[in-house]
Amino acid sequence: MSAALSPTAAHLQARLQARLAPTALEVIDESYQHAGHVGANESGVGTHFRVRIASSLFAGKSRVACHRLVYDAVQDFIDQGLHALAIETDIPSPSPLP
């Protein structure tokens, strides 16, 4: 996959924001750490990402089910060559009562 077709952290962030309405979201491109590994490209961007996300949609779901929601939200990026996605999920803390 060429860098021109590679997803960016901004692409993934926008998609996850739209699909999962997170209360906290961090998307980090870690592709440069995987240079020379399978799935990496020569540009060092757009192939390996870490996602830290908290969403109320995760409440009552197993870790596998939460990860499936994230994967489903970005499936077209995976189909285009996104190679690896490290996912850290959380459920938002309830707001304190006044």
Image (spheres, helix red, strand yellow):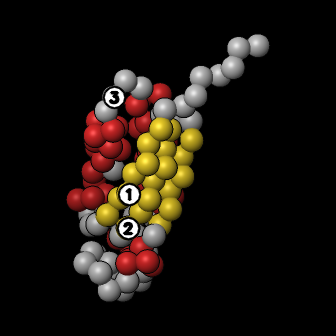
Mark 2 near mark 1, Cβ–Cβ under 8 Å? yes
Front tag of 2 and 1: 1
Mark 2 near mark 3, Cβ–Cβ under 8 Å? no
Q: Is residue 92 above or below residue 87?
A: above
Neighbor class of circle 2 (other Cα within 10 Å; few <14, some 14-19, many 20+) is many
In the figure, residue 63 lies in which quadrant?
top left
User: Residue at coordinates 23% horizontally, 59% vertically from top-left?
Assistant: 79
Residue 69 visible to the viewer = no
Which residue type carries mark 1? Ala
Query: Marks 2 and 1, Cα distance to the nearest angstrom?
Result: 8 Å
Left or right, 83 with respect to 92, comes to: left
Front tag of 2 and 3: 3
Q: Is residue 84 above or below residue 55?
A: below
Residue where numbered disc 3 is placed: 61
Which residue type carries mark 3? Lys
Q: Tag on residue 86?
A: 1
